[in-house]
């Protein structure tokens, strides 16, 4: 048996094999060749060992990964997969084996290995599951519950609605489906772009997987077999956006240390022993630290812990004050009676945060859906495969060549009290247990007027979430699609790149109401009121608007009413982006400006002062002079001259800056795609950098110019137009 590796003009791998397992092995091998450094970084992040070569900056993530038991959960899920679905488990094994085969050669190409001294390690069968879980564990935004708790404590319950927005760290996407009744060919089009933190190498890998059972092009997640999120099999195509569902819970635990270990107070009023052990975390250039891993019946403890921990065991201070003892020492289950800091022979209590997330409970990451997705021929096949999907919870759109369409939520959301969804809940009180899972929401099979739009807005998934993205992107996409009756694949990039900023309206309304301004401020105000509200790269008006917006955000954040929220709490550093006040105000600015009352803040005065500030020292350039791409790299190398960008957080062209903090854009379209159901070769795609993750290689950054301009590369499926680079004889 042999596998063949072809590449197109963009270096995108097209793989062909005679067996599914050989194809999986080839996918792992070619990914290791192109993305060896990325794969090893992701493996170590899943294990919580990345600080061993990246240094102290990676420590907070490693501690969270260890405490959340990411690798252990991946092991358990793979063991369960072997029992429930041995064929998929064997397929995942083949992929991991292919990665192992390709890593030595791939590592020789990647300069980061020699720079950090990292030696490629072994990929276990569960490693792809660990990579998947580590990639998505923050997608449901459970740290937002900590923000809501803090905001409510200091500002009252209305703060939850005021600050409800697509906030820092939350992934989103655009996606739209145009049915055959609205296209020139009579067949559907699916298009969109996932919004993620832009990484180099990119978070998506363009690839083609072909064998006698299927022939699929799509965007794979490096380190994970198959094509999960965006694919085209020739007869059916699909795409996802983040559903904004809430499916992870935080529990406040009461813990105490006894002579026999650690106990947690349960909802039955009794103390129960918990699982615990210690592990060392290695840090490049520094001594290792030892951390304590604790797991209660609710889930792993990710912050805090029992009082009296020996020095060095806890890398972050406990974020919660220790409550007074509120238990009966004679309650059955309090077996241990050792002296503690509380004195009197009774152990002292402390609080901690435990994270409950579905794969830890169900031992299922949904990998059984991946092969059926590749084998799908119709939307009915795809729908059946998505019944096996677990997480992250997504909104899916699909269409097939027979005219069928599908618009549904995929994933598992537990049924529990509303309090669980809003903020951390007390583990020692009843009423917060999970009670099964929600039914999957579906939209009508035929989209209204032939169009369906998904952009993280409150809609199909509304019963499953708390906070959703503002409706601006979804409304704008629909308006653009309604502007013409008939669509083609060629016309879709104009939607991808639309820069209209509807969320500017509240600030502009405040500007319009101002009077008695200085001449400079009045001229600036009039200029902004005449602005076309487009965040175009070459727009000086967009730059002026962003400057005024940032000044307003900073002035609001500086108001004394928000002072209690300015100091970051003692939670793990990796969670702090969700708790930072200025970004929260920046992303929720339109809500804060439109509210009837805002804690006594004189908003017109704040807007006036911001306008006068910018008028006195206006920016001299265009929006793209400061709004520049800011990708994440595990180890920064030679400085790149990253390009200036159009767009903004609430534009369809969602290139997210952080108002009030920076104009730089760490987040944006991690890929763009158009799937044509009339002719797959009329489909097209692009990623921010290129197919190859090796700096300096011909295909490392050759798509960047296309991506920046909103252009797309063609999808080529004719084997005669591809270049055969390698034929490998597979051994069984």
Image (tube, grey):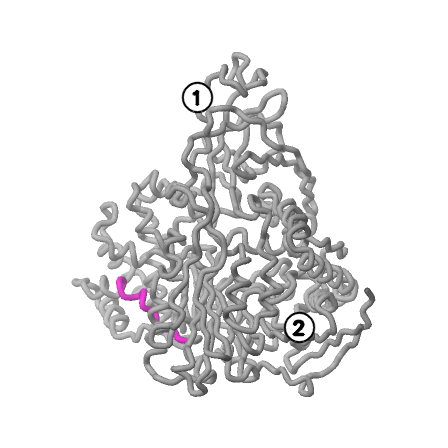
Q: Residue 520: image x %, image y %?
A: 25, 68
Q: Main secondary structure of the magenta part?
A: helix
Mark 1 surroundings within 10 Å by alpha-carbon count, few (fewer than 14), some (14 through 19), many (20 or more): few
Q: Is residue 544 magenta?
A: no
| Number of numbered tags placed on the structure image | 2
Q: Residue 721: image x %, image y %?
A: 67, 87
Which quadrant, please, contains the C terminus?
bottom right
Q: Is residue 642 left or right of residue 625?
A: right
Per the rendering, the mark at residue 706 is none
Q: Is residue 54 visible?
A: no
The boundaries of the magenta stretch are: 498-507
**Camera-nearest residue between 107 and 729:** 729
Residue identifier under label 2: 213
Which quadrant, please, contains the N terminus?
bottom right
Per the rendering, the mark at residue 326 is 1
Q: Give the SS element for disc 1.
A: loop
Image quadrant in which you'd find residue 562: top left
């Amino acid at each position: 048996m042999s596998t063949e590796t072809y590449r197109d003009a963009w270096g995108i791998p097209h793989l062909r094999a005679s067996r599914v397992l050989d194809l999986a092995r080839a996918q792992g091998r070619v990914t290791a060749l192109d993305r060896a450094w990325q794969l090893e970084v992701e493996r170590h992040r899943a294990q919580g060992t990345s600080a061993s070569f990246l240094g102290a900056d990676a420590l907070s993530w490693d501690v969270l990964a260890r405490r959340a038991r990411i690798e252990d959960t991946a092991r358990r899920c793979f063991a369960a997969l072997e029992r429930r679905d041995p064929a998929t488990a064997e397929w995942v094994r083949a992929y991991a084996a292919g990665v192992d085969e390709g890593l030595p050669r791939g590592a020789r190409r990647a300069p980061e290995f020699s720079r950090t001294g990292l030696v490629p390690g072994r990929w276990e069968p569960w490693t792809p599951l660990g990579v998947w879980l580590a990639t998505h564990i923050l997608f449901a935004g459970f740290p937002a519950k900590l923000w809501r708790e803090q905001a409510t404590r200091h500002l009252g319950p209305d703060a939850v609605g005021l600050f409800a927005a697509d906030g820092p760290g939350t992934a989103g996407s655009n996606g739209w489906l145009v049915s055959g009744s609205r296209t020139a060919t009579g067949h559907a089009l699916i298009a969109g772009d996932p919004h993620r933190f832009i990484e180099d190498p990119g978070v998506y890998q363009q690839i083609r997987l072909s064998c006698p059972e299927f022939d699929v092009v799509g965007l794979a997640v490096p380190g994970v077999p198959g094509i999960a999120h965006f694919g085209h099999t020739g007869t059916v195509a699909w795409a996802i956006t983040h559903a904004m569902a809430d499916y992870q819970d935080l529990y406040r635990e009461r813990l105490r240390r006894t002579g026999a270990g650690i106990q947690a107070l349960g909802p039955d009023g009794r103390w129960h022993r918990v699982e615990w052990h210690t592990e060392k975390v290695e840090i490049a250039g520094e001594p290792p630290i030892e951390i304590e891993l604790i797991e209660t019946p609710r889930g792993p403890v990710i912050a805090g812990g029992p009082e009296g921990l020996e020095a060095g065991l806890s890398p972050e201070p406990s974020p919660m004050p220790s409550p007074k003892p509120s238990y009966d020492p004679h309650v059955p289950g309090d077996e241990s009676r050792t002296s503690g800091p509380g004195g009197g022979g009774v152990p002292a209590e402390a609080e901690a945060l435990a994270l409950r997330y579905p794969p830890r409970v169900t031992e299922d990451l949904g990998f059984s859906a991946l092969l059926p997705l590749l084998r799908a021929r119709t939307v009915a096949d795809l729908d059946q495969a998505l019944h096996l999907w677990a997480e992250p919870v997504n909104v899916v759109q699909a269409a097939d060549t027979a005219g069928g369409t599908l618009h549904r939520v995929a994933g598992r959301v537990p049924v529990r009290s509303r309090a669980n969804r809003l903020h951390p809940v007390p583990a020692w009180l009843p009423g917060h247990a999970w009670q099964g899972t929600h039914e999957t929401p579906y939209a009508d099979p035929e989209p209204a007027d032939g169009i369906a739009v998904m952009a993280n807005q409150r809609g199909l998934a509304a019963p499953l979430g708390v906070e959703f993205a503002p409706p601006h992107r979804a409304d704008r996409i629909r308006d653009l699609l309604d502007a013409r009756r008939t669509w083609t694949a060629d016309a879709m990039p104009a939607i991808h790149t639309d820069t209209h900023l509807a969320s500017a309206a509240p600030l502009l309304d405040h500007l319009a109401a101002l009077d008695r301004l200085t001449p400079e401020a009045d001229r600036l105000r009039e200029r902004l009121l005449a602005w076309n509200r487009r965040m175009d790269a070459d727009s000086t008006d967009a730059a002026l608007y962003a400057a005024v917006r940032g000044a307003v955000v900073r002035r609001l954040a500086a108001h004394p009413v928000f002072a209690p929220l300015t100091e970051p709490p003692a939670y793990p550093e990796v969670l702090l982006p969700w708790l930072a006040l200025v970004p929260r105000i920046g992303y929720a600015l339109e809500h804060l400006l439109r509210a009837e009352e805002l804690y006594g803040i004189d908003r017109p005065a704040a807007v006036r002062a911001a306008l006068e500030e910018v008028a006195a020292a206006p920016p001299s350039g265009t929006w793209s002079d400061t709004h520049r791409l800011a990708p994440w790299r595990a180890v920064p190398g030679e400085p790149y001259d990253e390009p200036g960008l159009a767009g903004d957080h609430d534009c369809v062209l969602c290139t997210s800056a952080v108002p009030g903090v920076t104009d730089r854009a760490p987040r944006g379209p991690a890929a763009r795609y158009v799937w044509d159901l009339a002719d797959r070769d009329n489909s097209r795609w692009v990623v921010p950098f290129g197919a190859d993750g090796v700096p300096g290689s011909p295909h490392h950054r050759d798509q960047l110019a296309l991506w920046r301009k909103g252009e797309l590369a063609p999808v080529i499926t004719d084997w005669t137009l591809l270049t055969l680079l390698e034929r490998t004889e597979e051994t069984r």
